Image: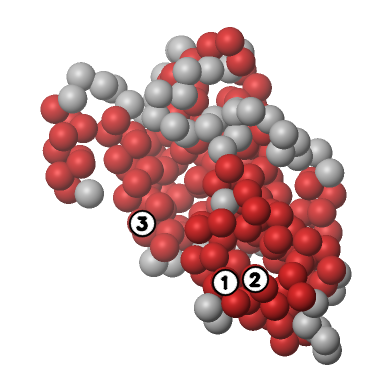
């Protein structure tokens, strides 16, 4: 991260330092430092002038990550505020101007997916299910990994709602969309473990998924 930071400062790209901050914040999120991550992201976002499509994409992406971090910290109001800011930013970028030079996938589809993720991180399976109805995974500007991650989130939501068949269906869909990511993703593996413990007679698709995950 330090080398990346030095390189970003020397590059003739005004947005790279903000993306380095985003990388640092995401690293802190894996360590459970949610509040620090949110503060770092917010400071970076406040320093961006949204005067062109690329700057707006970076700004919105920062707020999407802040929304997830705040949700994991249990701060629902802050999480939804960040998500709302990101959603507004995504709506301001004309699809014809969406360049996405950094692979951020900052678009309305990804923003809606993050809305479901915020609800899941807050433990609100009902809200996640409602928001899922407005998600269009057929959009061409959403990567397979992002689609699969959404399926994993919804599998968790359905599991919490005791709808095990729907949870399994979403898990199978996630694996079909992004096999390697799904099989090694920590939350996916934990969801499969819980499903295995839940069923009295394990369905063959679940047994196959468990075998492929080598659980």
Residue 207 sits in quarter: bottom right
Marks 1/2: CA–CA distance: 5 Å
Q: Which callout, 1 or 3, points to the residue nearer the camera?
A: 1
Where 166 sits versus 136, above or below? Answer: below
| For the residues bearing labels 3 and 2, Cβ distance under 8 angstroms | no
| For the residues bearing labels 1 and 2, Cβ distance under 8 angstroms | yes
Looking at this view, is 58 or 73 the one in front?
58
Label 1 crowd (10 A; few <14 / some 14-19 / many >=20)? few
The residue sitting at 39% across, 66% down in the picture is 31
Q: Which residue is mark 2?
A: 209
Label 3 crowd (10 A; few <14 / some 14-19 / many >=20)? some
Secondary element at tag 2: helix
The residue sitting at 38% across, 43% down in the picture is 22
Q: What percent of the width, then of the height, locates residue 188?
A: 60, 67
Q: Earlier in the sequence, mark 3 or mark 2?
A: 3
The residue sitting at 56% across, 60% down in the picture is 182
Q: Earlier in the sequence, mark 1 or mark 3?
A: 3
Where 37 sits versus 57, above or below? Answer: below
Q: Which residue is mark 1?
A: 212
């Amino acid at each position: 991260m330090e080398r990346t930071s030095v390189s970003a400062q020397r590059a003739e790209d005004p947005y790279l330092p903000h993306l380095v901050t985003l990388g640092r914040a995401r690293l802190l999120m894996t360590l459970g430092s949610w509040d620090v991550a949110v503060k770092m992201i917010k400071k970076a976002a406040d320093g961006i002038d949204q005067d062109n499509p690329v700057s707006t994409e970076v700004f919105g992406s920062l707020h999407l990550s802040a929304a997830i971090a705040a949700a994991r910290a249990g701060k629902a109001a802050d999480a939804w505020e960040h998500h709302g800011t990101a959603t507004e930013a995504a709506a301001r970028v004309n699809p014809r101007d969406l360049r996405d030079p950094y692979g951020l996938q900052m678009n309305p589809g990804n923003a809606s997916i993050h809305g479901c993720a915020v609800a899941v991180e807050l433990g609100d399976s009902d809200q996640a299910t409602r928001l899922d109805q407005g998600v269009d995974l057929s959009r061409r500007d959403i990567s397979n990994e992002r689609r699969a991650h959404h399926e994993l989130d919804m599998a968790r939501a359905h599991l919490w709602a005791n709808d095990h068949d729907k949870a399994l269906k979403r898990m199978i869909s996630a694996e079909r969309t992004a096999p390697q990511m799904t099989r090694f993703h920590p939350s996916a593996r934990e969801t499969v473990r819980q499903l295995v413990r839940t069923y009295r007679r394990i369905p063959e698709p679940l047994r196959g998924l468990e075998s492929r995950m080598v659980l």
